[in-house]
Amino acid sequence: MDKFTGRVWVLGDDIDTDIIIPTEYLALKTIDDMKQYGFSPLRPELAGQIQKGDIIVAGKNFGCGSSREQAPEIIKAMGVQCVIAKSFARIFFRNSINNGLLLIEQPDLYDDMKEGDEVTVVMNEHVDYNGKEYPIASLPENLMSIIQAGGLVKAMRKLNGLD
Amino acid sequence: MGETIIEKIIRHNTGKAVKPGDIVTVNVDRVMIHDIFIPFVADKFEEMGFTKLHDPDKVVLIYDHLVPASQQDDTRHFRTGDAFAEKYGLTHVHRSDGICHQLMTEAGYVKPGDIAFGTDSHTTTYGCVGAFSSGIGYTEMASILGTGTMWIKVPETIKVVIDGELPENVMSKDIILRLIGDLRADGATYRALEFAGSTIENMTVASRMTMANMAIEAGAKCALFTPDEKTAEYCEIELNDYQKSLVGDPDATYMRTITYKAEDFVPVMACPSQVDKIRNVSELEGTEIDQVFIGSCTNGRLEDLQAAAEVLEGKKVADFVKLIVTPASRKIYKQAADMGILKTLSEAGAIITHPGCGLCCGRTGGILSDGERVVATNNRNFLGRMGTSKVEIYLASPRTAASCAVAGKIVSPE
């Protein structure tokens, strides 16, 4: 996971949890049932277009709104490798790490990014796009270990010697 | 280099100086789980493979959103909670004592300088006594129960300084609503709010509680008030050196400082359906209303009921208005009864309910329908919060709310 490349979908500022997964679908039984409705208020076709390994690049305050843990869960279930945004809403950030979804804060990439292009992420160092390096902060080991375990439940199972 | 209050609390907890952006692991002093999420927490806890609580004494379980049950499935949450408490030796269980955020400081579970988390976004409330407290999801709560620790990102701090004397018809609710309107709903996301100034120093802990409670409505991670003599008296403790040190240093780094003159505040309301849509009450006068709600973890304390009673003394609630009063805890209910406040409210025509979350979370005790309007003292006016999505909710102070109940329409408080 030190370095990976993916095709990019570009979303805007203030992508809230109701856009990521509208309340009306939260009562569906599984995350797999829900994921086809991901981002539907904004771009109904997007859930069908996202492929495993793709990357989302967005503006500020990504994931604002409610504390629903289903929001990061469906993004992960769609196969998205990571979300790179100018900033993330607080509870969404935590829920993402805890559900094993990698988030990267980068202030400038969004302004330059063109949808459909590829970026390469060099973990803890920079994102490469169009011949330019965009610096990123390093994630501390404890957070990386949660993400690499596949989320907090799995990390705790590992801690407790179960998996 | 000076430190903000949140930086001091985290340094004390971890033993290392920190700066905004650092991610650190803290030892959690206390956690709160309420009835809605206990079944999810219990499931995750066992799925994670834990067989015992890291420290049962640090865990508080409170039934408040669903008490007394209004739907057939609600009692399942109590049975799950009771079974979890029994199995893991959890002794701090409150089954009908009041709202979680009121009880956590009232019953002495959270002290100045503590770090606390709860499965509810309004956990920011405990900042009223100078504790760092914040809301989290149920998966994360399950891991704290097992490990006793939690990772956090050290927030930048926005300092809010208020000096001077508030006009008589202005309450701390009017201050926090104005601040949310100025910051906007995402204006403090990731950030700590730190309050200072002579107005704050002269304020009761109960009034500070109202402001800390609503910090989340501007996205804040926490809200912090310096512990002082009033805090010590409220918590029934003597402040130790660490607790006394919880004041923002003059040379601390703040991302922003906002200054207000207390004399400039006026009664305000948050209009449907955004908490940051703030208008002066004087601009809204004459709007007819169907109901008034005075209560919640935001404004269901003794001074709030007292303010309402002062307005309602010798008066009657307008014929067509239902005035619902919900004390935040059993202790407050009893105090208000002993002081004759409940009698005054009742004689004026108020419906007084059991302590709990009730109407604020839209589950019971005064749900409204399409086209109806309510003036309420709680913290959220989101679409559908207190009934159907076509109910209009205006958030206000208890003094304003009581005045509106008498008039049957929106009016400025005396």
Image (tube, rainbow, N blue to C red):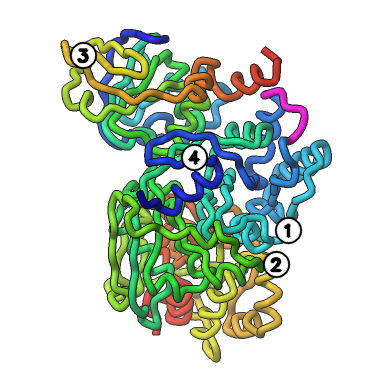
Badge 2: residue crowd in 10 Å (few <14, some 14–19, many ≥20)? some
> Which label sits in the foreground, 3 or 4?
4
Residue B286 visible, this orientation: no
Q: Chain of mark 1?
A: B
Q: CA distance from mark 3 to mark 2?
A: 60 Å
- Foreground: A147 or A35? A147
- In the picture of the structure, the residue carrying the numbered disc 1 is B96
The residue at which mark 3 appears reads as: A129
Q: Are marks 1 and 3 in contact (CB under 8 Å)?
A: no
- Residue positioned 45% across, 19% down in the render: A76
Q: Are the residues at dot 1 and dot 4 in contact (C-beta closer than 8 Å)?
A: no
**Spot occupied by residue B138 in the image (x, y as percentages of width and height):** 59, 36
Mark 1 and mark 4, same subunit?
Answer: yes
Q: Which residues are magenta?
A: B48-53
From the viewer's perspective, is B58 left or right of B315?
right
Viewer-proximal residue among B351 and B220: B220
- Asked if residue B5 is positioned above or below residue B90 in the image, the reply reads below
Q: Chain of mark 2?
A: B
Picture residue at 45% right of the left edge, 40% below the top: A66
* Mark 4 residue crowding within 10 angstroms, few (<14) / some (14–19) / many (20+): few
Q: What is the spatial separation of the Cα atoms under label 1 and label 3, in whole angstroms?
A: 58 Å
Callout 3: few (<14), some (14-19), or many (20+) C-alpha neighbours within 10 Å? some
Which quadrant is the C terminus of chain A positioned in? top right
Tag 3 secondary structure = strand
Which of disc 4 and disc 1 is earlier in sequence?
Answer: 4
Q: Nearer the viewer, mark 3 or mark 2?
A: 3
Q: Mark 2 sits on what residue? A: B330
Q: Residue at x 52, y 27 (%)?
A: A98
* Circle 1/circle 2 CB separation < 8 Å: yes
Q: Which mark is residue B16?
A: 4
Rounded to the nearest whole Å, what is the CA distance between mark 1 and mark 2? 8 Å
